[in-house]
Every structure is written in C-alpha cells, then in structure tokens.
Amino acid sequence: MSTTYLAAIREAQAVALREDPNVFIYGQDIGKFGGAFKATKGLIDEFPNRVMDAPISEDAMVGLAIGAAIEGMRPIVEMQFADFSSIGFNQIINQAATHYWRTGVPCPITLRLPSGGTAGSGPFHSQSMEALYAHYPGLVVVTPATVEDAYSMLLESIQLDDPVIFCEHKLLYYHLKADRLPTVNLPVGKARIARSGRHATVVTYSAMLHESLKAAAMLAEDGFHVEVVDLRSVKPIDTDTILGSVARTGRLLAVGEAFPWGGVTAEVLSRVVSEGFDLLDCPPIRLNAKDTPIPYHPNLWKAHRPTADSIYAALSELVRK
Amino acid sequence: MAQGLRLLSHMLEDSRCQTPPMSTPSTVSSEKLRSTFRWMLLARTLEDRIASLYRAGGSIVGGVYLGRGQEAFSGALGACLSKKDGDIFGGLIRDMSGRLAFGEPLLDPVRAYLGSAAGPMRGRDGNIHRGRPQEGLPAMISHLGALVSVVTGMLLARRLQGKATCVGATSIGDGATSTGSFHEAVNMAAVEGLPLVVAVANNQYAYSTPTDRQYACENLVDRARGYGIQGYVVDGTDLRACLETFTEAVAAARATGKPQMVVGKLLRLAGHGEHDDASYVDPALREEPSGRDPIDVATAYFDGMEVRKWQEEALKQVAEAIAKAQNEAGPDAGHEPWLALASEHLVEGRRL
Ligand SMILES: Cc1ncc(C[n+]2csc(CCOP(=O)(O)OP(=O)(O)O)c2C)c(N)n1
Ligand SMILES: [Mg+2]
C-alpha cells in the first residue's frame, strides 16, 4: 500500500487530532466536503467538533486561531490556496509572529498553505510565499518535498510552540508516493542530502527538489556527480549542511520556484558567500522563476519556472567553470 | 433541519420585499426584456459549449466556472448600465451574462478559455480573470471581495474628472460578503458617497459551504441598513423582476450618487467549477422557487418560435467565435517580453 503526499498530510492531521484534544482545524470547505484538495477528507466524521468550516474571512480565521492558541489550543488553519494567505498577512506577521516575543506567551498555530504552481492555474492560485513569511522574526517556515517529510514535519509543526507556515506543494499532492509513513525523521530545521555528489551542490526545496534530482540524473550521464541538498525548512535554514556540501563540491547552484528578487535562494547564496567564501571554486549562481506574475497559459508557465532542463543547463555551465 | 428553517424564513423575508407585484405595470420595456434575454441565451449557450469542451479535454486552458442559474440577475445588471456613457461593470466569477450584456465582446471569454494569445489577457491570465479596464470592465483577481473597492476607486476618479453621473457596479457572492474587503469597500463607498451598485448573488453556496456557515443575519440585505445605504431584494431567477430592480437601483445611484445594494436569491445550477459535481447541494433546493432555471422562467415571457430562433442565432455566434479562437495560436514563451513594469527602463536585467 502506498501513501501520497496529500494522504500523508491528511494522516498527520488525523494523528494530531487523535493524540491531542487541543488540536482543531479551521478552514473553508474542510468539513463534510473534505477541503478543496481533500486534505481533511473524512476527518469531520471522527472529530465532528474539531473540524470546522470557516467563512471566507482569512484575516479573522488567522486571528481566531491566534486567540485560541493563546488559550492553550493548537489550531491548524487551512488556507484554500497559499495565495489567499495574503488576506491574513497582518494577523500572521504582526499578531502571531510577535506574540511570544512581546508577551512571553507562545502562539502555537499551524497555517497550511497549498503552494506553488500547477499548469493553467494562473497568477492567483500558484504562488510560493515562503520568503515573505520567512522575512519576519517569530515564524517557522517549512517546505516539505517528500511524503515522509509532509507527514513528520506537519506533526512536528503542530507540536511546536510557535507559529508555523507549512508550505505544502500542490504539484506533489497526488503523484508523489511512499510505501509507508515514517516513525522517525529528521527534525524541522535540518536539511537533508537527497543525492550525493562531488562536482557541484544544488540547494533547493519543495517541488524544485524533484526537478533538481532529474537534472542531477541527466548530469550523471555526462559524467558529473551533483549533490542535491533539500532544505526541508527555509526558516530556520540549515547553513551547516549547506556549507558542508559546498566544502565537498566547491560549486553552488540554489534553485527556487519563487520570484527572483530576494528570497530563499538569495539567502542561501549570501550565507555561503559570507560564511564559506573560501570553499567556492567559482561564483555561485541562482535559478528562480521570472520576475513577472505567474502566467496562466501553460506555454508561458513552463518557461516562467525553473525546470529539470533549465537546471541542467545551469549546472552544465557551473561544473565546467 | 436548521437549514430548512432558515430558508423558509428567507423566503418570507423575500416575498415581503419583492419588487413590484405582477399586477402593476412593468417599468421594463419589452425591448429591454427581449434584448437582455438574448444576452442570457448567448451566455448559457457559450457556457454549455465551454463546459463540453472542458469535459472533452484538450482545448480549454485551466478551470471552467459557470454562471448557470445567475444569467437573469447578472444580465439584468449589465443591461441596466451604459458602457458608452462611462459606466463600470466589475464582473465576477458568474457574470458571463452581465459582461456580455454590458458590452464585453463575445470573443473575449472565448479567447480567454481557449488560451488564445489574441485575447485581452494574452494568455497571461484566463477564464473568468479577464477584462478591459480601459473600457469600464476591470479584470477581477481571484481574491474575493477585492474588486469592490477598485470599482469604488474608478468611481472616485470619474467624479474627480467631472463625470459624476457614471455608475459603477460589481457583483459578489454570498460567501464573499464574509470578507473584510467587501465590508471595507461598501462602507467606504457609503462614506465617500459614490454611485456604486453592489449586486449580491446569493446562490446559497460558497463552493460547498451553505450560507449558515457564512452569515447569521436574517437576510443579507439587512446589511445595507448597517452601511447606511439603500437595499433591495429580488427574485434572482426572474428576469423581469431583476430588470425592474436594477433599473431602479442604477437610477437611484445615478441620481443620488450613493451606493445601492441589491440582493438576489437564486441557486447555483452548476458545480463550483466544472471539476465539481456539487453532490453536496441539497436536491430539495432545486424544487424551491429560488432553484428555478432563469432561462426557463424568462422563456415563458416570449413566443416559443422566437425563442428557438434566438437560440439558433446564439449557437451560430458561439460556433463562429469558437472556430475563430481555435485557429489562433497560444502565447509563445520565446516572444514573451517578461515585463511586469510599465516603466520598461526599470525592469531588472534589461538593457535598453
Ligand atoms: C479571499 C479568498 N478566499 C478564498 C477563495 C477561494 N474561493 C474561490 S470561490 C470561493 C467560493 C465563493 O463563494 P461565493 O462568494 O458565494 O460565490 P459563488 O462561487 O457562489 O458565486 C472560494 C472560497 C478566494 N477566491 N478568495
Ligand atoms: Mg455563493
């Protein structure tokens, strides 16, 4: 029996609801309907009082979760799409993120953001918002790329005493599969070497892990062995694992699906350049989406985001520098 | 059960406020009734065709969201505005009929759905997310409620530019009335004194969520009183009633320069999108007056032979538009300039 990334997210919530009576889920269409993506399918049957349909009120949804968390609950909020979390932005970055620091009272909320691009989804159902949230002190931002991580990191996020932005990638929901769910896994904050190599390091996360792994396999046919680091969480970011890899390879490419200005890939480069400049054999490079909103038409969308081919092209240059 | 009671009380509320009973002579000319009905037919014909293309697969880009069941309410609003005189129609997800009646070219939705680069959105955006902002048709974003203040701002500009008699209308679903954006914008238009007509299409569901998880007031029109604006309730399935109410509301906005809120009771006669089988919709709702198909209701106003002729014309128009757009190329990434700024010299990585 195999489990999908989406089923892992559902299962983690079921386990959390079962194990802790303080956990509840709030979001649009998540009750009987089971959510726009079915990530809460059936949960309301087992927990009729702790899976609640919300009005279309993202600002108040986050505010409500914060209030409940202050009182000892552990709310999970499902945004129907990550893009709509912008409506809850004020509550997230000003109320939730500052709460522990200002009052000493923690704010353990988990915000699930169905993130990232899929063909034909357009500018408002495709965004990757991790960098925005990571910018603010007081938030943990995670970006699982595997079924195992989706499961264990969601469970851990719910248990953490801080607000967690859980960026789950919609492109991975249905076709990413694992044989079983893990009982132990790396904790939030630790990156993972997804593929070892000695000629160059790719640092990436979320759906771009899979594009990068494909590109690494293509390079292996050319005789180059690329190491791929999956960040898993973008805040905190595991600088040690990144530097360890660059120390082995001397070459760095950071790949992200988000917009190019600032963001996770820029953060990776700035850390390596300032803390590990001597490890580099040549200038590090970044690959991101283009600096326009995310296009609707697949012809444009495919060219807007990095793909295995564009990563392969960038790496081919990098390993020959 | 609780839901059933709520609906009943809504119906009572609705019948109390219903705009003119059939005995009074209608304020709507038979010409207006006819022309608006033809826009409804065109919208339904087009959407049926788009839906079947979607099911067949291969030609529609992205999702499909239909206005089935809302053609009378939407079309009447579009038909009561005057594009050439500078009115504004901020169409939303279920406004095919209203957009066409207001003056959106038929090719616009066809091109948007088929992903033609020749459409106004050039493949960058699509389906319902389309517009011609320079012609009074702002292009909605997905974030619900966000367009109400934008139309309000367009009206403010009209006033500042000496065109104070222009009316701006936009629609909103029952679900989207729960957004802060909706509340902020209606309140703002009221405070600012701008001729905004907000058409609340209460189709009883927001995706799968029934209205009792959306609001706790008796009828959404009660909110109008809270904002200090005029409210109207109308049977959203009846074209004649919709035209009468919107004629009155638009005229009041134009005359007083104040916002008006029209709440139409109807039922979404489709899935949320065509991916959705809507199995959560209580079938009993179809049997209620608000569950009537507005096309059927309006058909009864006309001669059957004539209706059939109009239907055939609509089919022909739709077939022509689809054939044209199907021959047009999609956007070419190689020729896409990837410019998000009007100030081209400020676009990073660009040497001019
Ligand atoms: C701010 C925001 N949150 C969530 C969504 C996702 N969403 C799209 S349509 C919809 C339901 C809208 O219901 P309603 O306003 O009643 O309009 P209807 O679809 O019934 O016409 C939801 C939740 C969104 N578009 N914007
Ligand atoms: Mg609705």
Image (cartoon, rainbow, N blue to C red):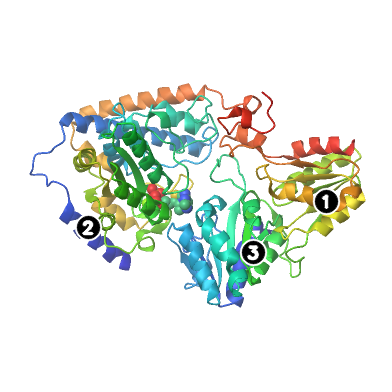
* Residue B109 percent coordinates (x, y): 43, 32
Label 1, secondary structure: give it.
Answer: helix
Say which residue appears at 46% left-offset and 23% top-offset. B323
- Label 2 Cα crowd, 10 Å radius (few <14 / some 14-19 / many 20+): some
Q: Residue B269: where, in percent of width, then height?
A: 35, 47
Query: SS at mark 3?
Result: loop
Chain letter behind tag 1: A
Tell me if B84 is positioned left or right of A79 in this view.
Answer: left
List the residue tagged with mark 3: A138
The residue beneath circle 2 is B11
Q: Tell me the distance, in whole angstroms, between the alpha carbons under discs 3 and 2.
A: 49 Å
Question: Mark 2 and mark 1, same subunit?
Answer: no
2 vs 1, front mark:
1
Q: Residue at x 64, y 37 (%)?
A: A291
Cβ–Cβ under 8 Å for marks 2 and 1: no
User: Residue A288: percent from the left, percent from the top?
Assistant: 70, 41
Q: Quadrant of the C terminus of chain A?
A: top right
Q: Relative to the observer, which residue lies in front, B193 or B213?
A: B193
The quarter in which the N terminus of chain A is drawn is: bottom right
**Circle 2 sits in a helix, a strand or a loop, which is it?**
helix
Q: Earlier in the sequence, mark 3 or mark 1?
A: 3
Chain at tag 2:
B
Instruction: State left or right for residue B172 relative to residue A21.
Output: left
- Badge 1 local density, few (<14 within 10 Å), some, or many (20+)? few
Amino acid on which the number 2 mark rests in the picture: Met
Answer whether residue A98 is visible to the viewer in this image: yes
Q: Chain of mark 3?
A: A
Q: Amino acid at mark 3?
A: Gly
Contact (CB < 8 A) between labels 3 and 2? no
